[in-house]
């Protein structure tokens, strides 16, 4: 599967998780899954996808890395606020907004450019992403 297709699937997973998180009464149970999916997705993008994309749009990659840092900070705030309902709900909205802006830009602006300019590399990059994702998921299972 192409790298951009795999990353779109990750984005859809994150969108669904945030819908569930906003509606969930048992956020302590769902939050570890949200954390895992965000961290694995970010690591895969930063390690494999963004280095390839840098040749397409280096300035955008720099901005995306900044966006990942903001998401990381909000995720930490969210984890810290799990016991404080109003603060938790506020951070969920902020984090979801940051993620959606970032994912929408990737899907609407970057993925089409990458699909066109890196077409020959996308299947191999997709295989690498899939392999890394599997390894990281295994690490999360072992750490749990």
Image (spheres, rainbow, N blue to C red):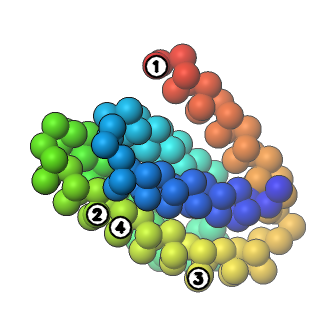
Q: Nearer the viewer, mark 4 or mark 3?
A: 4
- Say whether marks 2 and 4 touch (CB < 8 Å): no
Residue assigned mark 3: 109
Q: Earlier in the sequence, mark 1 or mark 2?
A: 2
Q: Earlier in the sequence, mark 2 or mark 4?
A: 2
Q: CA distance from mark 1 to mark 2?
A: 27 Å
Q: Earlier in the sequence, mark 2 or mark 3?
A: 2
- Residue under the point 54% across and 49% down: 41
Give the SS element for disc 3: helix
Residue 137 appears at what percent x and percent y?
59, 31
- Say whether marks 4 and 1 touch (CB < 8 Å): no
| Quarter of the view holding residue 111 | bottom right
- Around disc 4, counting alpha carbons within 10 Å, would you say few (fewer than 14), some (14 to 19), or many (20 or more)? some
Residue 14 appears at what percent x and percent y?
51, 55
- Say whether marks 4 and 3 touch (CB < 8 Å): no
Q: CA distance from mark 2 to mark 3?
A: 23 Å
Q: Nearer the viewer, mark 2 or mark 4?
A: 2
Residue assigned mark 4: 98
The vertical placement of 87 against 61, above or below, is above
């Amino acid at each position: 599967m192409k790298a951009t297709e795999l990353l779109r699937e990750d984005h859809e997973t994150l969108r669904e998780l945030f819908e569930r998180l906003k509606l969930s009464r048992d956020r302590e149970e769902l939050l570890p899954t949200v954390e895992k999916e965000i961290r694995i997705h970010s690591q895969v993008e930063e390690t494999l996808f963004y280095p390839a994309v840098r040749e397409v749009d280096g300035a955008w990659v720099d901005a995306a890395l900044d966006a990942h840092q903001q998401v990381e900070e909000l995720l930490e705030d969210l984890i810290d606020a799990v016991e404080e309902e109003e603060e938790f709900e506020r951070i969920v909205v902020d984090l979801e907004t940051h993620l959606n802006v970032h994912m929408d830009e990737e899907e609407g602006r970057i993925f089409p450019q990458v699909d066109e300019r890196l077409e020959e590399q996308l299947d191999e990059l997709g295989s690498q992403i899939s392999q890394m994702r599997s390894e990281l998921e295994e690490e999360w299972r072992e750490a749990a």
